[in-house]
Amino acid sequence: MAGDVLIDDSQVDKSRRVFLTAATATTGAIGVALAMVPFVASWLPSERARAFGAPTSLDLTKLEPGQMVVPIWRKQPIYVVRRTPQMLATLTNHDDRLKDPTSANSDQPPYAKNVDRARKPEFLVLIGICTHLGCLPKARFEAAIPELGADWPGGFFCPCHGSRFDLSGRVFDGSPASVNLRVPPYTFEGEETLVIGIDNANPKGAA
């Protein structure tokens, strides 16, 4: 009839085959991708693993003497300080002003129960949470600053309630905090990497 459009059945079949092939390929690709999700996820540490102690590594070559960095372990800030010889020299000058100078009543691994409170004197590793009510102490490494007085040897100051800690995290008399800052378990991989959250039984250089 005039005006009718003739449709070639072979063209229809060909178009249908192209559509079905494309749809099948797309569905297959989506299926493969979905199947891969748990496989790929298995390569990654879970949120639970990170929250409950997956180790945290730190490249020490980027930490200059006198500086502090704050990585996170178990959702806690960890203060890592590379102490200078001058900073270490202050640690034996004020035992009579400390609540727990030998760390007898404070929390640290055995290898950190010394005046340096460290596995290696140069590197101080502390949980950066005040042992009074959980605030974050501030680094006040310079001695005799006006804010803390002429007898201040350098250390940490908690702005919430005024607790003071020396450059080993030991608490000063007169502070609301009753014990020293806590030391987490840690070890070293070679000379360049600190691993927080691992406490080897026979670590190299342990005290």
Image (cartoon, rainbow, N blue to C red):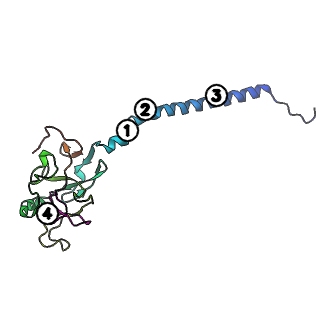
Q: Earlier in the sequence, mark 1 or mark 3?
A: 3
* Residue 93 visible in the shown view: no
Asked if the residue at tag 3 contacts the one at tag 2, i.e. Cβ–Cβ closer than 8 Å, the answer is no
Question: In the visual, does 198 lie left or right of 95?
Answer: right
Q: Which residue is mark 2?
A: 39
Q: Which residue is mark 1?
A: 44
Q: Secondary structure at mark 4?
A: loop
Q: Nearer the viewer, residue 71 or 49?
A: 49
Q: Is 162 rendered above or below residue 15?
A: below
Q: Earlier in the sequence, mark 2 or mark 3?
A: 3
Q: Which residue is mark 3?
A: 21
Answer whether residue 175 is magenta in the image: yes
- Residue at point 15% right, 37% down? 201
For discs 4 and 1, the disc positioned in front in the rendered view: 4
Residue at mark 2 to residue at mark 3: CA–CA distance: 28 Å
Tell me the tag on residue 172. 4
